[in-house]
Image (spheres, coloured by chain):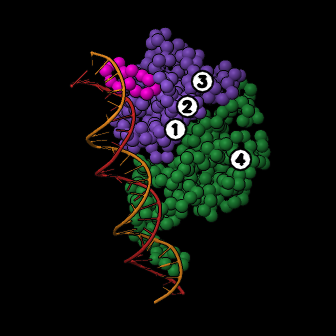
Chain colours: A purple, B green, C red, D orange
Amino acid sequence: MPRPDAETIICTVDVVLLTLRQDQLHVVLLKRDREPFRNALALPGGYVHIDTDQSASDAAARVLLEKTGIVSPYLEQLASFTGPGRDPRGWSVSIAYYALVPESILPAQDEGIHVVPVNRLPSLPFDHKSIVEHALDRVRSKSLYSSLPVYLCGESFTLPQLQAVYESVLGEPINKVSFRRKVDELGMLEAIEGEMQSGRANRPAQLYRLRREFRHSLSMLDRGLNSRMS
Amino acid sequence: MPRPDAETIICTVDVVLLTLRQDQLHVVLLKRDREPFRNALALPGGYVHIDTDQSASDAAARVLLEKTGIVSPYLEQLASFTGPGRDPRGWSVSIAYYALVPESILPAQDEGIHVVPVNRLPSLPFDHKSIVEHALDRVRSKSLYSSLPVYLCGESFTLPQLQAVYESVLGEPINKVSFRRKVDELGMLEAIEGEMQSGRANRPAQLYRLRREFRHSLSMLDRGLNSRMS
DNA sequence: ACAATAGTGTCTTTCAGACACTATTTC
DNA sequence: GAAATAGTGTCTGAAAGACACTATTGT
């Protein structure tokens, strides 16, 4: 364990764990069990352990597992946040990561795990608010031209469900025909031979799953879903 | 100055300084004046100074200025590279930045400053080769939909010159009409009321410069120059 | 049969690339 | 006037969005 003092740079990782609940992006926050900011809600984070971690990415995966019990199939470096003022203990570096998971794998909301909608963030310690906002920017812009949002779905899902996920992430409706053309172009899905009943009276939708090659990496488009962003 | 030992994470910044020479991207490498890898060519880099640097970005700008004399109008964080093995002194974090500058502001190639073509990189110490490759990926993909390559031009330039710069970065020809439509759409340039003579006999081209608002930040497109990449 | 949603065919609009034409300079 | 490159007008083809139509379920 690093022993921070005035001579040393504090080196940590933080994880922005995102999920979709009721068609809204939510971020997982934990109640801090130690100083500084004890009892405040903050991103899951912790020191890099030079004795066990082979990289910051390892540290992020370890922290996420230790603090939430989750192993995320998608975990990507976001950016590093640095400076003398962001942590009261001293000059610090936080290497931030983001992860997307289906709501179904989240542990029950208790034990200090809070899932809060990203558009109703409470005030957060350190510069965690800024980190979350950077993560949202990244997720939204990557969702325009990649398969990233599929990590918010469970093992299997229908195309209408997947489209709703994209629409929730991007915050606006997508043309159905174009969406299906793009999904086809991405080539990331395979049909499963069972179907799905909609709860009510209608034609059932085909279930799909991610192809094996894309379980842990993205598929990219040249041209993007042309949901206006900018 | 941090005093690295087995207990401490070594915290540094490295800068990938890119420029265009003879229509080819080049990276600036310096001969290291101390161990480890004394006398090897490497990226300009150095320790974060917690007594003077207000952020890693400050550290990168300082290192760049100290080692090359350059103040780059565009300097962006690339990613952080971490692990126990990348630096022989111990577990290290390098927060990497990249910068683009016109060749004209580079100091004379001596005093240990080397400008080498990116497709003929020598073997580099640490994981600097990987850092350079990440920077190239980033620059190329951002060049598809932003004004990034203008930082490779000087104060003023013509549209044919700018197009050549984009083509050099992207490594393939661009349609002239489309390019001009996109430049116009980006809205980042303003005409200067002098013209430019081409060295030989032809119609002179209008000179342009970056609008003030874009001197230190990019302009982005929704749709990109459709130079095929991926 | 009707309601409801899945899935597709096709027309229209928008945008990128091809190409040719005009413009302006030097020789 | 010829050569050379700057700059533009316009046509063509590709891709995105609109919209309507068919398909398949439960009630």
The circle drawn on residue A211 is 2
Query: How far apart are the two marked residues, 3 and 1, measured between alpha carbons?
Result: 28 Å
The answer to the question of whether label 1 and label 2 lie on touching residues, with beta carbons closer than 8 A, is: yes
- Mark 1 — on which chain does it sit? A
Residue corresponding to mark 4: B42
Residue A76 in sight from this viewpoint:
no
User: What secondary structure prevails in the magenta region?
Assistant: loop
Residue corresponding to mark 1: A187
The answer to the question of whether label 2 and label 4 lie on touching residues, with beta carbons closer than 8 A, is: no
Q: Position of residue D20 (x, y in %)?
A: 26, 41
Q: Are marks 3 and 1 on the same chain?
A: yes
Vertical position of residue A3 compared to residue A149: above or below: above
The mark lying in front, picked from 3 and 2, is: 2
The residue type indicated by label 1 comes to Gly
The circle drawn on residue B227 is none
Q: Residue at x 66, y 29 (%)?
A: A55
The answer to the question of whether label 3 and label 2 lie on touching residues, with beta carbons closer than 8 A, is: no
